[in-house]
Amino acid sequence: MRKPDLIEKVVIRSGVKKKDAKPVVEAMLAVLGEALAEGQEMRLPPLGKLKVNRIKDLENGTAYIVKIRQPKKVGGDAGPAGKDTLAKAAE
């Protein structure tokens, strides 16, 4: 998903106008990016708990290897094979 897609989904879900949603989404992404850069652990329901496992400096930027743990959903769907859902940044 790209930022324009995210903004559109926020507009649809919230019912606010795009011109009102765009600066809020951009500010939220900036705050999340800063928190990740500082290695902060975040608890953001319903997204889940985010924790930076490793930080790797690359010649064109920085790679953050992040663990995301989401609570089990109602109905027992916890992701593939019933395990916690993990997302890792591409190295």
Image: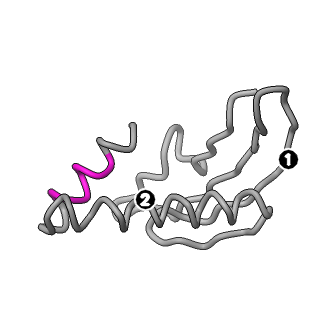
Would you say 65 lies left or right of 29 here? right
Q: Residue at x 15, y 57 (%)?
A: 12
Which quadrant would the C terminus be assigned to in this image?
Answer: top right
**Is the residue 77 above or below the residue 24 in the image?**
above
Is 45 magenta? The answer is: no
Q: Which mark is residue 54?
A: 1
Marks 1 and 2, how far apart at CA: 25 Å
Amino acid type for the residue under numbered disc 2:
Glu
| Front in this rendered view, residue 55 or 77 | 55
Percent from the top left, x then y, of residue 25? Answer: 38, 61
Q: Which residue is mark 2?
A: 26
Amino acid type for the residue under numbered disc 1:
Arg
Q: Residue at x 75, y 68 (%)?
A: 40
Would you say 25 lies left or right of 57 here? left
Query: Which segment did they paint magenta?
Result: 6-12
User: In terms of image quadrants, where is residue 11?
Assistant: bottom left
Would you say 37 lies left or right of 57 here? left
> Which tag, 1 or 2, sits closer to the chain's start?
2
